[in-house]
Image (cartoon, grey):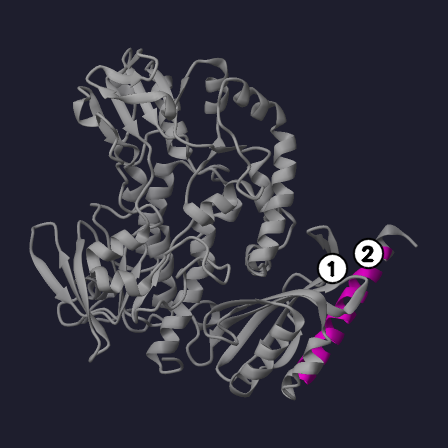
């Protein structure tokens, strides 16, 4: 048999096996037969639902647990018409975490709309699933106004004597006679993505940001900043980046794109606007939200939902360091660092060895600053290329972006751990020399508490790692000094007094010390009671999902968006569909 014939034969068998499993699955589901459903799953199996059966993000493991949940939900959900999705990546045999599987994207209908899912059948036992994911894709009668359902434009086209499109946009933005249904705090990628999704579902949404222009959250950051992951995973909903853009997007290019995106997607944005505080009116299921404009005037609005979309890096954390008040030089947080251009031929200390600390140190060094980086704790360091690219290998396999997003969401916490552990083992091999050289100069290095590297550090604590774009070699070569925080007694006017009695002189100290958790922002803006009710935000929750992210929280009307551009693209739809379902009475 030729190679082409073998591939075609394998593809045909993958399609047939996928359809057989889906037919059996639907039959067992229709009869709500948990025992029969359980036989369709492997002894070790994983399921993740995004709204389709649970109206939340819900993972589970084990055949009996998965089958019991599905059988219990079916009388309400009425899922039916399961079939391999036409026009999507066809079923294929691939290896996931070293396991050969038949991987298929499927579609189905429910009582409220339609869904998409992913199933991974064991290649050597295709009657049983190892992984299943189901997601709500649209609500019947409330579809996104895109493609064939785009607006006709009759509301403003050739409207002689009446308002044209610009008139209507100006009127919509000012909110003279109405309040938004949703108030989004933060006009970065997360705020704009979720606002774009909500607008397509006819949800009146206002985005506010303290910066003067949309995109300034990127523009104001340090001069040399560019994204650390490649462009093909970073597109926003509806509008992919141009095909001629660089693989690693510079910050100002991204900031300008966000500003253009907000205009193109017809988003209502108030810049130079601060969300001062909010209180919840339970009787009317709405918020009393105080906004302060650039001229100092305040307005109280009454949205039903508030989405915190100011990222996982909200309020800068400035630790109480011994003797810091005595330091005679300038102290700034990395959040406010722009460039080392004004510090040439001077001495600087950078406290922190995460991404920001390394990038700030490298920027200072490039401007002729005598720079020393201070390490507070063990750090994971990964080369951007080739190592960090391993985590996005799925997006280089060939399927379209929408299919890759579906495939990427079909992962529960245990599989995530195994996947990162496998990737980190390869990373450590790729970066073997760099790691050894860093350790040789006294750099404290680790691969994460369970060998899961920087990705799980990001999910668990939002820091503790560096994606290397050149600073590591500068440290290895001694061009940037390395000092351990444990060797510092205290700060003194001249710099850092070491425990051996020597002084490390400095005229600048940059605190690359991270940010307060989101709970602190909630406490400051909504009060201690609501902060306590909401609980942990970001980090790993009890179910293995990111805590309180992209789903309903214990406080009605409070939502959180966070993460990179890929996460904002994927989960903005999850948030928007939940809010739409609440607004039309499908869920409470």
Quarter of the rendering occupied by the N terminus = bottom right
- The residue lying toward the viewer, choosing from 426 and 505, is 505
Q: Is residue 283 above or below residue 131?
A: below
Q: Residue at x 50, y 20 (%)?
A: 473
- The residue lying toward the viewer, choosing from 538 and 528, is 528
Left-right relation of 30 to 362: right
Q: Farthest front residue?
A: 500
Visible residue check, residue 470: no
Q: Is residue 283 above or below residue 100?
A: below
Left-right relation of 369 to 163: right
What is the distance, in whole Å, between disc 1 and disc 2 at their CAs? 15 Å
- Residue 143: where, in percent of width, then height? 44, 74
Q: Which residue is mark 2?
A: 7
What is the span of residues highlighted in magenta in the rendered image?
A: 6-28
Q: Which residue is mark 1?
A: 101
**Residue 9 - label:** none
- Residue 491: where, in percent of width, then height? 25, 22
- The residue lying toward the viewer, choosing from 98 and 264, is 98
Magenta segment, principal secondary structure?
A: helix
Q: Secondary structure at mark 2?
A: helix
Q: Residue at x 27, y 36 (%)?
A: 319
* Earlier residue among tags 1 and 2: 2
Find residue 156 and report its image quarter: bottom left
Front label number (1 vs 2)? 1
- The residue lying toward the viewer, choosing from 67 and 276, is 67
Q: Farthest right residue?
A: 1
Visible residue check, residue 84: yes
Task: Tell me the crowding category of disc 2: few under 14, some 14 to 19, or many 20 or more residues within 10 angstroms, Cα based.
Answer: some
């Amino acid at each position: 048999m030729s190679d082409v014939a073998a591939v075609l034969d394998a593809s045909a068998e993958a399609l047939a096996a996928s359809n057989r499993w889906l037919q059996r699955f639907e039959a067992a589901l229709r009869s709500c037969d948990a025992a029969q459903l359980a036989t369709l799953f492997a002894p070790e199996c994983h399921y993740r639902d995004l709204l389709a059966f649970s109206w939340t993000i819900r993972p589970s493991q084990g055949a009996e647990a998965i089958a019991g949940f599905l059988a219990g939900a079916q009388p309400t959900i009425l899922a039916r018409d399961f079939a391999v999705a036409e026009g999507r990546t066809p079923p294929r045999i691939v290896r996931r975490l070293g396991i050969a599987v038949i991987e298929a994207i499927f579609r189905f209908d429910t009582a409220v709309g339609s869904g998409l899912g992913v199933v991974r059948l064991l290649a050597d036992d295709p009657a049983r699933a190892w992984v299943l994911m189901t997601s709500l894709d649209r609500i019947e009668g409330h579809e996104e106004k895109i493609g064939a359902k785009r607006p006709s434009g009759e509301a403003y086209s050739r409207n002689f004597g009446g308002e044209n499109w610009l008139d209507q946009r100006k009127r919509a933005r000012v909110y003279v006679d109405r309040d938004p249904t949703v108030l989004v705090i933060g006009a970065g990628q997360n705020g704009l993505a979720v606002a774009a999704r909500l607008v397509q579902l006819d949800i009146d949404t206002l985005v506010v940001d303290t910066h003067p222009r949309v995109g300034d959250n990127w523009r104001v950051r340090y001069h040399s900043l560019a994204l650390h992951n490649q462009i093909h995973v970073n597109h926003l909903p509806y509008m992919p980046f141009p095909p001629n853009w660089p693989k690693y997007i510079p910050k100002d290019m991204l900031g300008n794109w966000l500003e253009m995106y907000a205009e193109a997607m017809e988003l209502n944005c108030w810049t130079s606007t601060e969300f001062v505080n909010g209180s919840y009116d339970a009787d009317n299921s709405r918020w009393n939200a105080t906004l302060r404009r650039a001229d100092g005037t305040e307005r109280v609005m009454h949205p039903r939902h508030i989405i915190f979309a100011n990222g996982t890096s909200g309020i800068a954390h400035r630790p109480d360091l011994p003797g810091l008040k005595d330091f005679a030089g300038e102290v700034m947080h990395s959040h406010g660092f722009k460039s080392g251009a004004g510090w040439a031929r001077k001495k600087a200390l950078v406290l922190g060895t995460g991404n920001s600390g390394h990038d700030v140190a490298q920027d200072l060094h490039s401007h002729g600053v005598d720079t020393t980086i201070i390490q507070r704790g063990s750090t994971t360091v990964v080369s951007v290329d080739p190592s960090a690219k391993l985590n996005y290998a799925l997006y280089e396999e060939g399927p379209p972006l929408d299919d890759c997003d579906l495939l990427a969401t079909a992962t529960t916490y245990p599989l995530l751990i195994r996947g990162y552990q496998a990737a980190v083992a390869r990373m450590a091999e790729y970066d073997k020399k760099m790691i050894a050289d860093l350790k040789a100069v006294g750099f404290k290095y680790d691969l994460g508490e369970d060998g899961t590297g920087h990705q799980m550090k990001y999910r668990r604590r939002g820091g503790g790692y560096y994606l290397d774009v050149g600073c590591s070699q500068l440290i290895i070569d001694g061009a940037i000094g390395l000092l351990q925080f444990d060797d510092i007694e205290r700060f003194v006017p001249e710099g850092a007094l070491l425990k051996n009695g020597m002084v490390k002189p400095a005229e600048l100290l940059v605190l690359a010390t991270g940010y307060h958790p989101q709970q602190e922002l909630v406490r400051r803006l909504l009060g201690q009671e609501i902060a306590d009710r909401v609980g942990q935000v970001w980090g790993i929750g009890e179910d293995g999902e990111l805590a309180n992210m992209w789903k309903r929280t214990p406080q009605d009307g409070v939502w959180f968006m966070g993460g990179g551009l890929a996460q904002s693209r994927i989960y903005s739809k999850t948030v928007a569909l939940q809010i739409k379902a609440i607004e039309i009475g499908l869920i409470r």
